[in-house]
Image (spheres, rainbow, N blue to C red):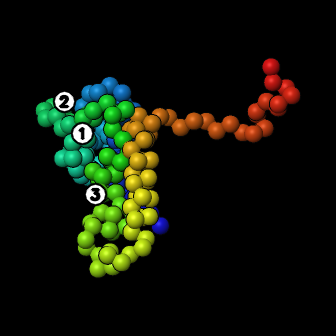
Amino acid sequence: MIRLSRLSDYGIVLMSHLAGFGDGEPHNAREIAAEASLPQPVVSKLLKALARQGLLESHRGTKGGYSLARRPEEINAAEMITALEGPIGLTECTVHPGECAQEASCHVREPWRRINDVVRAALAEVSLADLAQPPRTPTHPDTLPLAGNVG
């Protein structure tokens, strides 16, 4: 199974909360942890990592904290995953070419590279603004108008 680590998932949740504040103001780790219902030590660690990778700005002082380095529309899921996990790669050879002894004779290397490129491009199409949207209320099929009753 291909999945993000729990810390990466939490990191993206934190980014989403910062985007959701919508004020561009710095928010401290305690405030963000409370908003996200996550332990403050974990939140502090992730915020520092995201700031080191240039996705957040760190502000010192009594009203300090963290804010997004760019607008939510300008940050995408691929960037956040790369900042938290490292390069996106479904197989080792898509991340570290030349390290596999089978690489020269591997007939699935090129198809895996193409799949990896498609996955990376799809993640790049999802912005932090998209991720920060409030969940839609699902519409129950029984509440939809029938085709003959529309209008």
Of the pair 132 and 121, the residue shown nearer to us: 121
Disc 2 element: loop
Are dots 3 and 1 in contact, CB under 8 Å? no
- Residue at left offset 24%, top offset 39%: 56
In the figure, is residue 35 to the left or right of 57? right
- The quadrant where residue 140 appears: top right
- Residue at left offset 25%, top offset 71%: 98
Q: Where 104 falls versus 8 (above or below)?
A: below
Q: Which residue is mark 2?
A: 63
Residue type at mark 1: give it.
Answer: Leu
Q: Residue furthest top?
A: 151
In the figure, is residue 35 to the left or right of 29? right
Q: Where 118 falls versus 103 (above or below)?
A: above
Of the pair 78 and 116, the residue shown nearer to us: 116
- The quadrant where residue 92 appears: bottom left
> Which of the two marks, 3 or 1, is nearer to us in this view?
3
Q: Which residue is mark 1?
A: 56
